[in-house]
Image (cartoon, rainbow, N blue to C red):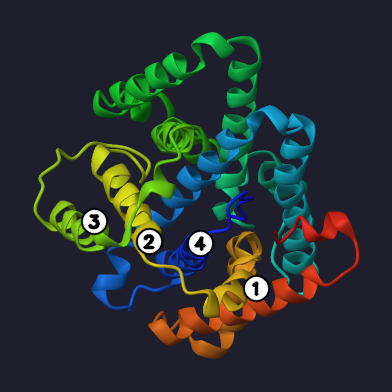
Amino acid sequence: MEIEIQHRNINLDFLKVICAFLVIVEHFGSQCPYFIKGITPLAVPIFMILSFYFLIQKISTIDIEKRVFRILIPLIGWSVIYSILYLFILKRNITVYDFLWQSITGHSPKLNASMWFSSDLIALTLLIFILYKYFKKYFFKIIFCLFCLSYLFEYSEINYMLFSDLRYELKYPLGRLTEMIPFMVVGIFLGKYDILKCCKSRFILGWLILFLFTQECIFFPSIKGFDYCGIKLILLAVLMILFFSSIPQKRIFQKFVCVLGKNTMGIYCIHRLVEAFLHPYFGGTQNLFYCLLIFIISWLICFGISKIPLKYIHYLVK
């Protein structure tokens, strides 16, 4: 996702690029090396944490309607694009119901199921603005309670029981909404205390050791959920962010990384469409080269869209 920031951190921009690539590996990289596949579940949690990390730092100056509108445009805009191209170019059987489900929940199996993230992000953004506006005095206490309740629902498997029997278009966006709350809350508290600005290069090795130790050694009980449940995932995501924040910034790479990182939202939205056109020519080969090819083509298309001199078109990719 595109993240608006006050203090430019090219390391976090680079982390966004890596996460965009990891999303592609998660979907189309079954033959990629294990050390890459093993961290693909961290992409969405990192996006969510960073989104609310920067949101909370300027929440009092943000227009809620514009913010939600900006997130809503990709959800509906890409629903239209996918529907048209799948129906008329790829000759798939797309119905009005497929389009409506995609536009509302972002999780139609015939279009782009990856867009569930946008619908959850919209819901949580609205929630945060409502809580901040009407319960500002108790805001941080309330969201901490939400953090605790979300894990109570996850580890008791109440969340899974509530949504697992719903139809495909609903169960994942609704089930994952609860699972996204801890990432949202951690992002808000990181932003409240501006913790990432305190990360120094001397911490790099420590964050890396903690990450590897948590990834390989610490035991966490398995629970039924919708792919993003459990404490281990949030620990790994935070450690990954702290690690990248501690790396000394090299200004020589700033322009390159900034240009590459501006269209991560678009890559996230378009990569399934790109793969649908590439698939007949590569026979479903899901290796590292295939994922890189999808990433490069997706970025080039998004870069072209970003050059169209229309403000709302830019929101599709930024």
Q: Earlier in the sequence, mark 1 or mark 3?
A: 3
Secondary structure under tag 3 reads helix
Indicate which disc residue 16 carries. Answer: 4
Residue type indicated by callout 4: Lys
180 is higher (above) or lower (below) than 109 = above
Q: Earlier in the sequence, mark 4 or mark 3?
A: 4
**Pointer 2 residue:** 244
Q: CA distance from mark 1 to mark 2?
A: 18 Å
Q: CA distance from mark 2 to mark 4?
A: 11 Å
Answer with left or right where residue 295 lies relative to residue 317.
left
The residue carrying pointer 2 sits among few (fewer than 14), some (14 to 19) or many (20 or more) residues within 10 Å by Cα, namely: many
Residue projecting furthest to the bottom: 281
Secondary structure under tag 4 reads helix
For the residues bearing labels 3 and 2, Cβ distance under 8 angstroms = no
Q: CA distance from mark 1 to mark 3?
A: 27 Å
For the residues bearing labels 1 and 4, Cβ distance under 8 angstroms = no
**Pointer 3 residue:** 207
The residue under the point 51% across, 68% down is 17
Residue type indicated by callout 2: Phe
77 is higher (above) or lower (below) than 270 = above
Closer to the eye: label 1 or 4? 1
For the residues bearing labels 2 and 4, Cβ distance under 8 angstroms = no
The residue under the point 34% across, 50% down is 237
The residue carrying pointer 4 sits among few (fewer than 14), some (14 to 19) or many (20 or more) residues within 10 Å by Cα, namely: many
Q: CA distance from mark 4 to mark 3?
A: 18 Å
- 251 or 180, nearer to the observer: 251
Closer to the eye: label 4 or 3? 3
**Pointer 1 residue:** 259
Image location (x, y in percent) of residue 101: 67, 42
Q: Is residue 200 visible from the viewing direction of this image?
A: yes
